[in-house]
Amino acid sequence: MKVLVAVKRVVDYNVKVRVKADNSGVDLANVKMSMNPFCEIAVEEAVRLKEKGVATEIVVVSIGPSTAQEQLRTALALGADRAILVESAEDLTSLAVAKLLKAVVDKEQPQLVILGKQAIDSDNNQTGQMLAALSGYGQGTFASKVEVTGDNVAVTREIDGGAQTVSLKLPAIVTTDLRLNEPRYASLPNIMKAKKKPLEVLTPDALGVSTASTNKTVKVEAPAARSAGIKVKSVAELVEKLKNEAKVI
Amino acid sequence: MTILVIAEHDNKVVAPATLNTVAAAAKIGGDIHVLVAGQGVGAVAEAAAKIAGVAKVLVADNAAYAHQLPENVAPLVAELGAGYSHILAAATSNGKNILPRVAAQLDVDQISEIISVESADTFKRPIYAGNAIATVQSSASVKVITVRATGFDPVAAVGGSAAVEAVAAAHDAGTSSFVGEELAKSDRPELTAAKIVVSGGRGMQNGDNFKHLYALADKLGAAVGASRAAVDAGFVPNDMQVGQTGKIVAPQLYIAVGISGAIQHLAGMKDSKVIVAINKDEEAPIFQVADYGLVADLFEAIPEFEKLV
C-alpha cells in the first residue's frame, strides 16, 4: 500500500525565537530551520511500515517555500521513495494546506496519510483533521500506536487522562504524537542516495486550489514576562510565606 | 450574535473545561447555546442547562456520538453550527480532534487555543510554544474557535435555567469505530482542574522517588504533574506531563521540584498564580519565573515541607 507523509519546514526546536520590533511576526532571518519534530515521527512511522512490508511506497509532500526541498531531501534520506513540493512563498493557513494536500491525495490515492499532530511554529493542530474532513476519511489523531490489518488501521490515541483505541477504514489519516516512535538519523550513504531520488515541484495554481484565508494575523507580541520573586532560606520560611504572604495554602 | 458551545463530557458529567469555554463565549457576547452530543446524556444536559449564562441546551443523544468520534460528531456540529456566529469548544483532546474537522466542513479557518477575547472577531493565542502571542482576526461567517481553559475563569456551574431541546440529526459516517480506552485512575484531583499542583522533574532521579511528591500532594490536596524530562526518562506516565506538548495548567499554587525550567515546561505552567521552585542548582532557569525559590536538596526539603503543612 502507498503511504503519503506530509512534512513542514519550521524553526529548529532548539532556537529561541524573537518577536520582530514592528510586531509583524517572529524573526526568521538567519535562523536554523528543520523538519517539524512531529513530522519526523510521521516519516519514521512510514519507514517502519515499509520495513514491516505493510507499505510498498512512501511519498513525502511538503507545502512551503522552495527551501523546503531541504526537508524533503531529509525525508528521502530517512527512507521515503519520492517527494512532492507544492511551492508557495505565502504564509498559508491550515485550511489552505489541507486543501492542497487533498489535491495531492486525489492525485496519488494513498491508503494511509501520516502527518505530525501540530507544527511547532503556528501550534495550530488542525491540518490532519481538516484533510480528513475534506477527504471524507476517518482520522486517528495524536497516535501513540498504529497497526494496519487488512482494510483497517487500529490507532491508539493519547487523550486527556489516558489512551483510546479506534479502528479506521482505509484510506485513513493519522497524526503523530511524541511517543509513537523515536526517529532515526539518516546515514551518510542514504543522504547521498537521497540526492538522486525524484522530487517533483508543483504549484497551488497547477493543483487548482485557492489558498484564500478567513484569518488575518494582526500583530505578534512577546509574552508578558514573569519577574523572578525572592529566594527563601529554608522550608520553614517557604511554608510561612505561602501561608501568610501568598495565602495559597 | 448567537454562540454555540460544544460541551465536554463523558456521557455522565460536564467537564470543568466547559465552564471556561462558556466564559470565553460570554466575553464575546450574545446568546449562548450549548450542544451536548453523546449517548445517554440526560444528566449532562440537565447539568448544562444550569450553567450560568446559557440560554439553550441542544441534546443529540445517539449511539453514533457515544465516543465523540469526530467522523460522526463533526458533521452534526457543522450542520447545527452553520447558523451561529461562533462555534466554541475547549482545547481538550476531544475539542482539538473534532473542531478542525468542523471548520473544514464549513470552509473556514479555525482559531486554535485562544487565551483572550479582544472583540467579537479578534482573539489572542500563543504561538511558538508560548514564546510569542499572536492577535488573530477572523472574517469567517462562522468563527470556529478552541479555547484554552486556563485563559478564562470558569462561569458558575449553577444558577442558570436554560431550555433543553432534542436534536434529531443522526450522522454515522461508518468510517471509524471505538475499540477501547484505558484511563488512568487516581484519587487526586485532575491536573488541569487542581488548585495546587506539585510537579517533579529529572531531579527526582527515578519513579519511586515520586512517592515523596505524592505524600506532599495528599497533604495539600494537590494534583501531581511532571516535566517532559521526567516522562521521557520513564519515571511517570505521559498523562502527568505539564508543558506545551502535555497539559497546560494554571493553578493557584504550582510547586516545581527538581525541574530545571525548559521553555516547553514553562509554556505549560507560567500562568499559575504563585510558583514555587525547589532545586539544588541555583542557576536553574525555573528560578527566573518563581515567586518563591528554595535552593535545597529536594530529598531533604520535601519531607520537611510535608511535615510543616
Image (spheres, rainbow, N blue to C red):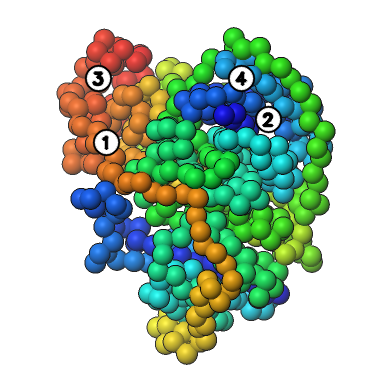
Q: Mark 1–mark 3 contact, CB under 8 Å?
A: no
The three-letter code of the residue at mark 2 reads Leu
Q: CA distance from mark 3 to mark 2?
A: 46 Å
Q: Is A220 left or right of A202, judged from the image as shown?
A: left
Q: CA distance from mark 4 to mark 2?
A: 11 Å
Disc 1 element: loop
- For the residues beneath circles 4 and 2, the answer to whether they share a chain is yes
The chain to which mark 3 is attached is A
* Residue type (three-letter) at the residue carrying disc 4: Val
Question: Residue B231 location in percent, x, y?
Answer: 45, 45
Q: Amino acid at mark 3?
A: Leu
Circle nearer the N terminus (1, 3): 1
Mark 2 lies on residue: B35
Residue bearing the label numbered 1: A224
Left or right of residue A247: residue B114: right
Label number found at residue A238: 3
Quarter of the picture containing the N terminus of chain B is top right
Helix, strand or loop at disc 4?
Answer: loop
Q: CA distance from mark 4 to mark 1?
A: 32 Å
